[in-house]
Image (cartoon, rainbow, N blue to C red):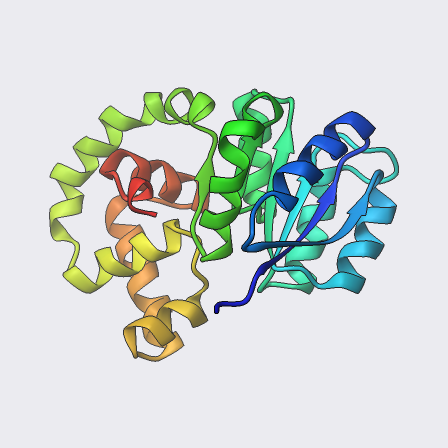
Amino acid sequence: MSAKTRIVLADDHPIVLSGLRNLIQSEEDFDLVGEASDGIAASRVIREARPDVAVIDISMPGLNGIVLTRRLVEEMPLMRVLVLTLHEDRAFVTQAMQAGARGYVLKRSAAECLVQAIRAVAIGGLYVDPAIADRMFAGQKHADRQKSSGFGLDLTEREAEVLKLVALGFTNKEIARQLDVGVKSIETYKARGAAKLGLKTRVELVRYASAQGWLAEV
């Protein structure tokens, strides 16, 4: 039997937290190992529990979820952070992903999407709520397809493979282990492939990956 996914929940609304708790506890492969109702408490609980996945609200008293995510990702790179929020604005999605979050789910979609999102990020994938994913990437799809029909054709098979795994949320070390090559080689493939596509940030890479259908393969 495989190990359960250990999860910490952080949200300052008691009713929301109760609903999230019920969702997590209804899944046999999940183990709820901690809860918090503000950013400071969440920071302490997560550091103590060392979960596989931390589900964090953006707007919390004491310490907001974006800052908390950035700190946690730096300290615990193997832990996955999934942001759960009311905010549907693209700017919040961008901030969360740049901070290191692997998932972004709207509270109004939690009942339908949270379990799937946790499972996706737990195995190294990336998850963006379907309610905002199309809107977030729509403006980029045409441009990205143009890139893929031009510069994209110059990608080697290995460069494309590495970029795909990066977009799905895997670290350089994880990719190196998966492809059985050195970390330095992975860094080279990633840098060379990104340069060919004209992609300068991880957010741009995720947009490109979405246009190519890579994220749907998680």
| Image location of residue 103, percent across then percent down | 52, 41
Q: Residue 13, can we see it?
A: no
Count of picture labels? 0
Determine the residue positioned at 56% across, 43% down: 98
Give left or right: position of 181 versus 106: left
Q: Residue at x 29, y 65 (%)?
A: 189
* Res 11 → quadrant: top right
Q: Nearer the viewer, residue 198 or 190?
A: 190
Could one spot residue 14 in this view of the protein?
yes
Residue 191 rendering spot, x and y as whole percentages: 34, 59
Answer with left or right where residue 139 lies relative to residue 81.
left
Q: What is the x, y in percent for residue 202? A: 44, 46
Residue sitting nearer the eye, 128 or 112: 112
Establish if 86 lies above or below 191: above
Q: Residue at image x 45%, y 21%? A: 131
Q: In the image, 177: left or right of 160?
A: right
Q: Is residue 208 above or below residue 46?
A: above
| Residue at the (23%, 25%) spot, across then down | 142
Quadrant position of residue 29: bottom right
Image coordinates of residue 78 in percent, x first then y, are 57, 64
